[in-house]
Image (cartoon, rainbow, N blue to C red):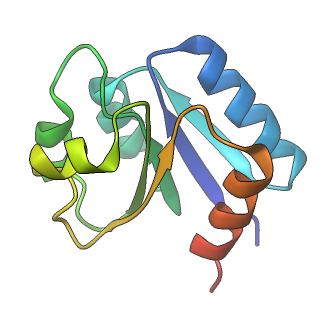
Amino acid sequence: MTKTILVVDDEPDIRQSVKMILEKNGYTVLTAENGDDCLFKLKEKTPDLILLDIMMPGTPVNEVLKQITDIKIAFMSVVRISDARKKGLTSQKNIVDFFQKPFNVTDLLDRVNLLLRD
């Protein structure tokens, strides 16, 4: 069964490149341009994993996180993990990984594959 990933990033180039990489590797990929769009898309479909940028316009990501408690989330951000921890963004149990942008494509795929193993 194909796994579904929701890529949430306000930068269109990032959304499209990550989508293309993941689709070429057999995943179904949905995209959202910010936290509000993410929450809207979650009403339509529940993905197996959300790749979520930390710094986006609109509703602050910490508010978005409060509404997503049962889906694995991996941050994908230029913000460093120590800064994310300071902002209290890594305390939820469903936050499973952190990708520093720019990221290595092979590393991204390896880690996504690991996160989505049954």
In the depicted structure, whether residue 105 falls above or below residue 9: below
Q: Quadrant of the N terminus?
A: bottom right
In the depicted structure, whether residue 111 falls above or below residue 4: below
Q: Is residue 42 left or right of residue 112?
A: left
What is the x, y in percent for residue 52? 41, 41
In the depicted structure, whether residue 90 falls above or below residue 102: below
Q: Residue at x 19, y 66 (%)?
A: 92
Q: Quadrant of the C terminus?
A: bottom right
The reply to whether residue 70 is in sight is yes
The reply to whether residue 47 is in sight is no
Residue 19, picture quadrant: top right
Residue 116, picture quadrant: bottom right
Q: Is residue 52 left or right of residue 12?
A: left
What is the x, y in percent for residue 42? 38, 44
Q: Nearer the viewer, residue 44 or 107?
A: 107
Numbered marks: total = 0
